[in-house]
Amino acid sequence: MASITLTQPEIYRPSRLTLLLGYLRRNTGLAIGLFILLVLVVFTVYGLATADLSDAYPLSVKSKQPPSLEYPLGTDFFGRDLYVAMVVGLKQTATIGFLAGAIGTFIGVVLGFVSAYFGGWLDLGIKSICQILTPIPALLIQVIIAGSLDKRDVTIYTMAFVVVLLAWMGPTLVIRAQVLTMKERQFVSVAKLSGMGDLGIIFGEILPNLLPFIAAAFVNQVFIAVYASFFLAVLGLGPLREPLLGNTIWAAQTQSAFFNNWWWWPVFPAVALVLILGSLAFINMGLDELANPRIRRAE
Amino acid sequence: MVKLIIRRLLFLILVIWAASTITFFIPRLSAKNPVRERFAELARSGGFSPADMDKIIASYSTKFGLDKPLWQQYVDYMSSIARFDLGVSYNKYPKTVMGLIMDSLPWTITLLLVTTALSFVIGNLLGAVAAWPRAPQWVRSFATPFILFQGVPPILMGVLLLFFIAFKLKLAPLGGAYSTGGIPDWSSPAFIWDVIHHQILPALALLLGSVGGWVLTMRGMGVTIQGEDYVNFAEHKGLDGYTIFKDYYLRNALLPQATGLALALGTVVSSAIVIESQFGLPGLGRVLDSAIRSNDFLVIYGVVLFVTIAVATLMVLMEFVYPLLDPRIRNA
């Protein structure tokens, strides 16, 4: 008997990078969003590494200069190099967005889990508080909070704190809804029957399945935080000394920049904010598709 | 139905109570004393000695009831809100906060009504058409630029429009309610046209910043509805495309959008307020803006509380409109 030797055919396994790039090609929203964000990060990091950051504060350069080779984005009425102000402002915007986004998502995940998983009075309480607070326009309440603070006390961190105070209800309700459907699934029942504890089920069974939703909630939360801090800053309630993007636009408005022909002063920060918020919106749309494959039918 | 109305009204009262409680406690939690702050500002600009200032502050605190225990202040505050009394402006004394709000309200309401209605209609039509497979491709592609704009908030749209249209192309004024030197005379058509001319750009900013959201949600809604059995049934009955689009497709897709309208109200009003201060229009935005600049606390709190209560009330009232839109709810 002749033995038959089977040659295992080479199986082509694409690397993780190829898979990721392939997915990004299908999910254009996510790809565009990540690309814009990457460009902004590179711009900021390059600026932080090369520029003299003290030029972002008043009285450091010649004032009211239009964009030129020396000052790519011009300088403002107070003698700030607006290119450096943009770099510092982008970094501060990122700080606020990341901090407030992370804290808000964390509170949302914890409250959402507790509410949905344990149910009963706790659920009723958390749900009712969220529902009562939802119709109240958070941006305006934040105006009161920021307006009650002493102007000298307002820093980037208090801004993040003010923003997060009224921005945890959204993620709480989203996570709660997801946990509610998740905890009825069979794999959770199996885990329960096999004697797994509450914590084990939450961290071992439900949480990993919720990660795409948490990621989407986080990006959404960063968007809200960036927008809310911009809203407060553009009303003159931000940390006035800092070159936060919204502050720069506010300062330009107070000095009637357009009437005085200093168009570059408000326009560049506005474009930067459009890019930030746009990229976050694109990423959010892309993550929605990742988390909720049903939407894919829409294309 | 009666039960539902009572439940919604109780919910509304709870929301208003929560909003007023937040606006009562937040300022009092901070170390800032509005009366002292205001007089410190006056003292800096010259005038009286610090000792006199303490006396003045004490007498003002008694006048405004700031020396009473907290719970009594809270009760007084709540009962004054129930009487629509929001206090007086420090800066424009003896004008009341309510008076300032009422003077500026018509401007804000007009701007909001026009832009919200336009953006709702345009956005939903574009979104519905974009998802309608029988619409010609060139009509469907109208929606794309609006979807791209969707992430741009109206306030930033305002800056960009000011730059391109008012500053570069000089097609619109840079701000203000009417031309400088214009005399407010509502009977002259020239003046009214001048006012409209000044409102176009802010309205456009609000419109462009909000249409995209409607297009996006409506398109998603439309895609789901196309697959429904009743739409297939209507097609097989041989109804013409226009009837299917209008009665079977659009009408059902619009209902969730009406809910969205209520939810979007808070954001729209907040944007309108900043837009007004940006373009120097005489609305609530300018009242709030000048109050923030001059530390006129009661005006800040009053405007915010007023808008908050108005938005919450409208949101709850919107729910009473659903039965009119949807016979399924009406007959249930």
Image (cartoon, coloured by chain):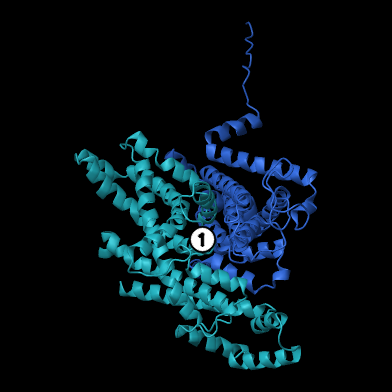
Chain colours: A blue, B cyan
**Residue B10 vertical placement versus B134 (above, below):** below
Residue at 29% across, 52% down: B251
Q: Observer-nearest residue: B184 or B156? A: B184
Left or right: where does residue A150 sit relative to residue A293?
Answer: right
Q: What amino acid is at disc 1?
A: Phe
The C terminus of chain B sits in image quarter: bottom left
- Quarter assignment of residue A171: bottom right
Q: Residue furthest top?
A: A2
Q: Observer-nearest residue: A204 or B171? A: B171
Q: How many marks?
A: 1
Q: Residue furthest left?
A: B238
Q: Residue B202: where, in percent of width, then height?
A: 47, 57
The N terminus of chain B sits in image quarter: bottom left
Q: Residues within 10 Å of mark 1 (few under 14, many from 20)?
A: many
SS class, disc 1: helix
Left or right: where does residue A267 sit relative to residue A56?
Answer: left
Q: Observer-nearest residue: B186 or B312? A: B186
**Residue A161 vertical placement versus A18 (above, below):** below
Q: Observer-nearest residue: B107 or A121? A: B107
Q: Chain of mark 1?
A: B
Q: Residue B222: where, in percent of width, then height?
A: 36, 46
Q: Residue A20: where, in percent of width, then height?
A: 61, 34
Q: Residue A148: where, in percent of width, then height?
A: 64, 74
Which residue in the structure is indicated by mark 1? B279
Q: In the rendered image, is residue A196 in sight?
A: no
**Residue B39 vertical placement versus A69 (above, below):** below
Residue at 57% across, 48% down: A274
Q: In the rendered image, is residue A141 in sight?
A: yes
Residue at 33% across, 43% down: B226
